[in-house]
């Protein structure tokens, strides 16, 4: 067990976003930096009764809202949008002011990944989006043409792939639009696709002090996917909730 050490409590952090805001998220070749932000129970479960929100603790919920301030776009799978009743991204006024002062849009856009386009286009995720941060829909050319037209009425559509959404192409399309920091909020299937393609640069994983949730992991790897290795960068704690920040193994010194 060489190398094991006890982690001792450190100073209290007034702003929970501060340790994450200090991370440099820039790719030298202009690609997107992809940060995945997920929460899981002690048994690896990613939901309770089909919803992630019921697994989240108050400290996790606060960080979840604040992490969006670091992103150019929030990326999420359609099933998660439906299950969690997603709305547009909203930030506290002081975070909005800081973004505007830095020359960034007031809030990041929401991007929904969907092959089927089976979404409620009157839902808050689309109807409440401001003109300067219109919701994006990322789909593939095999999508139903009628639904595709409906999507174009409610959102900005990105076609990335033939019979399915291609993760690499989707991120390249986002980079072409100027989105450099992508915050992926799941779900497990979409996150598994990104990890399998080697596209997740950073994983911010919250361990909630709960067991007995749904038998669904934080990330669901597609068949034949290779193992992906990550390096632990930061460990934080609030009450009984643990926050782990990893970066992809290739970023390790």
Image (cartoon, grey):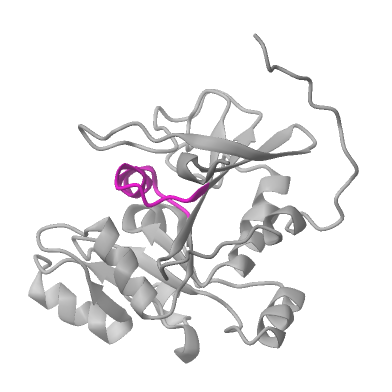
Q: Position of residue 48 (x, y in %)?
A: 49, 36
Q: Residue furthest right?
A: 11
Name the residue rendered at 35%, 31% in the picture.
Answer: 227
Q: Position of residue 96 (x, y in %)?
A: 68, 79
Residue 175 appears in which quarter of the rendering? bottom left
Q: Position of residue 33 (x, y in %)?
A: 47, 61
Quadrant where the C terminus lies? top right
Residue 107 in view (yes/no): yes
Q: Give the extent of the magenta segment.
A: 185-202
Instruction: Tell me: residue 155, above or below residue 216.
Output: below
Q: Position of residue 129 (x, y in %)?
A: 47, 81
Between 77 and 103, the one nearer to me in the picture = 103
Between 74 and 169, the one nearer to me in the picture = 169
Residue 201 sits inside the magenta stretch: yes
Q: Is residue 188 left or right of residue 15?
A: left
Q: Is residue 237 left or right of residue 216?
A: right
């Amino acid at each position: 067990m060489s190398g094991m050490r006890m982690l001792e409590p450190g100073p209290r952090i007034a702003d929970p976003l501060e340790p994450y805001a200090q991370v440099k998220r820039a790719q030298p070749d202009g690609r997107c930096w992809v940060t995945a932000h997920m929460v899981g129970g002690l048994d690896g479960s990613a939901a309770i009764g089909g919803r992630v929100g019921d697994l989240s603790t108050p400290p996790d919920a606060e960080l979840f809202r604040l992490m969006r301030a670091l992103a150019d776009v929030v990326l999420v799978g359609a099933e998660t949008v439906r299950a969690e009743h997603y709305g547009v991204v909203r930030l506290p006024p002081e975070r909005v002011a800081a973004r505007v002062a830095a020359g960034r849009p007031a809030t990041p856009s929401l991007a929904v990944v969907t092959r089927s386009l089976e979404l409620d286009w009157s839902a808050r995720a689309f109807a409440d989006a401001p003109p300067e941060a219109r919701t994006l829909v990322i789909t593939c050319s095999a999508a139903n043409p009628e639904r595709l037209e409906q999507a174009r009425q409610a959102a900005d559509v990105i076609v990335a792939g033939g019979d399915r959404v291609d993760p690499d192409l989707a991120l390249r399309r986002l980079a072409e639009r100027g989105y450099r920091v992508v915050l992926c909020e799941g779900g497990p299937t979409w996150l598994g696709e990104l990890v399998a393609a080697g596209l997740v640069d950073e994983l911010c994983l919250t361990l909630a002090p709960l067991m007995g949730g749904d038998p669904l992991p934080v990330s669901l790897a597609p068949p034949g996917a290779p193992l992906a290795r990550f390096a632990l960068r930061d460990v934080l704690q609030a009450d009984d909730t643990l926050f782990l920040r990893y970066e992809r193994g290739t970023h390790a010194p």
